[in-house]
Image (cartoon, rainbow, N blue to C red):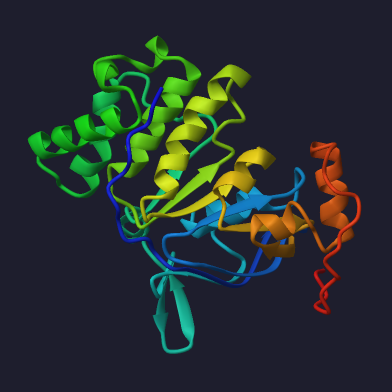
Amino acid sequence: MSAQTVAPSRGGLVEIRGVRKSFGDLEVLRGIDLTITPGEVTVILGPSGSGKSTLLRSINHLEPVTSGLISVDGEVIGYRREGDRLHELREKDVLRQRTAIGMVFQSFNLFAHMTALENITEAPRRALGTPRKEAEAHAHELLALVGLAEKEGAYPRQLSGGQQQRVAIARALALRPKVLLFDEPTSALDPELVEEVLAVIRSLASAGTTLVIVTHEISFARDVADTVVFMDQGRIVEQGPPAQVIDHPAHERTRSFLQRVRPDAPTDSPVPPTSEDPS
């Protein structure tokens, strides 16, 4: 499968400030501060339970934060400001905000009773009021983009896992989002299907949309990321370009994680530790 090149689009600026998230007594995010630059690719790495997916789901308010703020292009997500107070938005207003923040889940989440074409046109027609012909024309373009032009009439049960995930990517792109979130997009796929999905994401990475990707694919992270963020126990331990975080990590926790998931990872780092306390 050879993915076409995506037409450039303007990516959104994501600002995460002092974000904490608790589920009962369990604090999953412990004060996250992160700026995600427009049009860049940020990959989030970390062990299971580190808070990666919760942080991702907080960006589009699928998980309301306990405290702190997340904004896209200056608009606070999930809340409205009244002076110094924040009030949670009504669901319809949150849904409006989510049209600018696409998300691709690890389990595809396609509508089983809809064809590939219908899965892609559903959100633009319902959320944006896009006329059917216009939505279908765009869907045809997106299916061609992800290498599935001939599958527009297929139902999810008739598609492989890799094909379903590519339809899910096309569906997320149908709203022309400023920010596109990927939550372990290859974890539910057989190994031989992983590369076809990663190829599509690589093509998106050069197109101008802001991408935030939670993944366990270390070599892919090195290849595609502008910034790698390593999380552990609800905190950002370190962040920087792949050559720094993956190849020459400054923090021992990052080194030990990479050594487990990638045996050829460096055990020593020539980069001196920063003075900032990563915990």
- Viewer can see residue 23: no
The relative height of residue 226 versus residue 13 in the rendered view (above or below) is above
Relative depth, front residue between 24 and 76: 76
The relative height of residue 248 versus residue 157 in the rendered view (above or below) is below
Q: Residue furthest front?
A: 270
Locate the N terminus by quadrant: top left
Relative depth, front residue between 202 and 24: 202
Locate the C terminus by quadrant: bottom right
Q: Position of residue 131 (x, y in %)?
A: 9, 41
Q: Residue furthest bottom?
A: 83
Q: Position of residue 272 (x, y in %)?
A: 86, 70
Question: Viewed as shown, does residue 84 lie left or right of 99?
Answer: right
- Viewer can see residue 86: yes
Task: Please name the residue shown 32% across and 22% down the image.
Answer: 148
Relative depth, front residue between 137 and 24: 137
Task: Please name the residue shown 83% across and 75% down the image.
Answer: 277
Question: Viewed as shown, does residue 92 lie left or right of 162?
Answer: left
The relative height of residue 181 versus residue 118 in the rendered view (above or below) is below
Q: Position of residue 134 (x, y in %)?
A: 11, 39
